Image: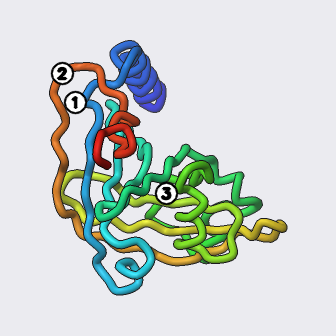
Amino acid sequence: MRGLLRVMVTAAAALEAALGAGAARADDLHLYSYDPADADTRHAAGPLTFTVKKGLLHTTVLNLRSTEAPATAYLRPADERALGQGGLARAVGAQPVERSLYEVEPAEEGAALIAAFCPGAGRAWLAFGPVKFDRDLTVLVVGAPSAGGAPKLCRTLRFSFHGEWLLPPGRPFNPRDLERSRYPGS
């Protein structure tokens, strides 16, 4: 039975790779907008929009944008080993439901996001719960000091789903085209 399941998962991954080759299409990308669900989240983050790429077997968060200001931070998937021995569970003190780990890229507004979400940290990671349409979202912010030291939980951000921004259907789409600085008058 395990062998059959392994074959099915491998076949589905191969199918996704074959179908997903090339430029991202608008129907693969989704922009989910969230409102802060508590005072700490409102103070640290405010309303945010997450760009996600949905695949056959998984969802990848590409970036987050301030819904109220021209600020974008890019994320890259990270392995728990980046957090040291014990990984995410050691950093947050429990076995979290939020398992999809991303490192905040410090380029552009990423450094400002790290400072806002985890003051004093030189690096930060975001651990996401399931990112789905019409579902609230919890994000754990884990940070590590610039001078070394063990990563630790900085804060828990809680968001209420607000809505989805629709993208043009069926044609190749680059999510960086949404950058406000590329449009006149922004």
In this view, the residue in front, 43 or 153, is 43
Q: Position of residue 160 (x, y in %)?
A: 24, 69
Q: Is residue 96 visible?
A: yes
Q: Amino acid at mark 3?
A: Arg
**Image quadrant assignment for residue 39:** bottom left
Q: Is residue 21 left or right of residue 99?
A: left
As measured in the structure, the alpha-carbon distance from the residue carrying label 3 to the one carrying label 2 is 31 Å
As measured in the structure, the alpha-carbon distance from the residue carrying label 3 to the one carrying label 1 is 25 Å
Q: Residues within 10 Å of mark 1 (few under 14, many from 20)?
A: some
Q: Amino acid at mark 1?
A: Asp
**Image quadrant assignment for residue 68:** bottom left
Q: Position of residue 12 (x, y in %)?
A: 37, 23
In this view, the residue in front, 65 or 13, is 65
What residue is shown at x 35% (from left), y 62% (from top)? 69
Looking at the rendered image, the quarter that the N terminus falls into is top left
**SS at mark 2?**
loop
What residue is shown at x 22% (from left), y 63% (from top)? 161
- The disc placed on residue 99 is 3
Mark 3 or mark 1, which is nearer to you?
A: 1
What residue is shown at x 60% (from left), y 60% (from top)? 111
Mark 1–mark 2 CB contact (< 8 Å): yes
What residue is shown at x 22% (from left), y 61% (from top)? 135
Q: Check the image and name the residue furthest to the right.
A: 147
**SS at mark 1?**
loop
Q: Which residue is mark 2?
A: 170
**Image quadrant assignment for residue 70:** bottom left
First reached walking from the N terminus: tag 3 or tag 2: 3
Q: Which residue is mark 1?
A: 27
First reached walking from the N terminus: tag 1 or tag 2: 1
Q: Amino acid at mark 2?
A: Gly
